[in-house]
Amino acid sequence: MKIYHVKGTRSIRVIWLCHELNVPLDIETIPTFDAAFKASPEWRAKSPTGKVPVLEDGSITMYESGAMVEYILGRYGPGDLVPKKPEDLALYYQWCWFAEATFARPLGDIIHNTVIKPPEERIAAVVPDATQRARLCLDGIERCVENRAYLLDDVFTAADIMMGYSLMLAERTGVLTADHPNSQRYFGFLEKRDGFKAAREA
């Protein structure tokens, strides 16, 4: 498999997962924040929206990080990263979707209006609103991990990989602060994992 990667982006999830599963992965770093590259026909043939990551596995090409995680788990074996009990599996799927569909969305709004967009295109009012929405998400995580190491008690799963990237964004944007101590502690556990370290440094 090959992942087209930009440091600090959602490709971290795929790299981290492959480290946890000990699945070989070729990492090709690309200049995706270069407007000309993003718009090139060659890149748009891989990623119609021009975004990163892109995963190639033989004849398969994918450009959605959460789907890549599920594909790799399904094809190369989940190990202990996907729970088997229906009750745990339901929570697993909930947290996987929450991490991207609910939590990452306001964090992305913050980043777009503080970093990515040129200053003249930024909408200042978006940032406080997005910050409030992101902190509501942290409230939910805070309760979940109050007395446990990971989202599903003391068992590390791929849901923690999905959430770990979103928490990394929360820390980067200043949303994850000391008033969410359980979430900070939980993120600290994730940061200590070798797979996370390797993915963040890639």
Image: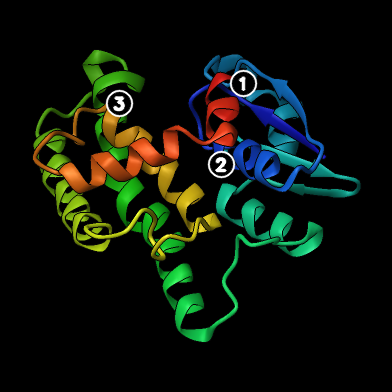
Q: Which mark is residue 13?
A: 2
Query: Closest to the observer: 43 or 174?
Result: 174
Residue, x 17% and y 29% (percent of image)? 123
Instruction: Residue 7 in the image: state x and y as whole percent.
Output: 54, 21
Q: Is residue 22 above or below residue 117?
A: below
The C terminus, quarter of image = top right
Check disc 2 and give the amino acid type.
Arg
Check disc 1 and give the amino acid type.
Ala
User: What secondary structure is marked by label 1?
Assistant: loop
Instruction: Residue 82 in the image: state x and y as whole percent.
Output: 60, 66
Instruction: Residue 95 in the image: state x and y as whole percent.
Output: 40, 63
Instruction: Residue 200 in the image: state x and y as whole percent.
Output: 52, 25
Residue, x 47% and y 77% (percent of image)? 88
Residue, x 35% and y 46% (percent of image)? 104
Q: Mark 2 to mark 1: distance in Å?
A: 12 Å
The N terminus, quarter of image = top right
Q: Residue farthest to the bottom?
A: 86
User: What secondary structure is marked by label 2?
Assistant: helix
Residue at which label 1 appears? 202
Q: Which mark is residue 172?
A: 3
Q: Mark 3 to mark 2: distance in Å?
A: 16 Å
Within the image, what quadrant is residue 154 found in? bottom left
- Is residue 51 visible from the viewing direction of this image? no
Could you classify mark 2 by the number of other residues whose Cα lies within 10 Å: few (under 14), some (14-19), or many (20 or more)?
many
Decide if residue 34 is on the left or right side of residue 109: right
Q: Earlier in the sequence, mark 3 or mark 2?
A: 2
Mark 2 and mark 1 residues within 8 Å of each other at the beta carbon: no
Could you classify mark 1 by the number of other residues whose Cα lies within 10 Å: few (under 14), some (14-19), or many (20 or more)?
some
Mark 3 and mark 2 residues within 8 Å of each other at the beta carbon: no
Q: Earlier in the sequence, mark 3 or mark 1?
A: 3
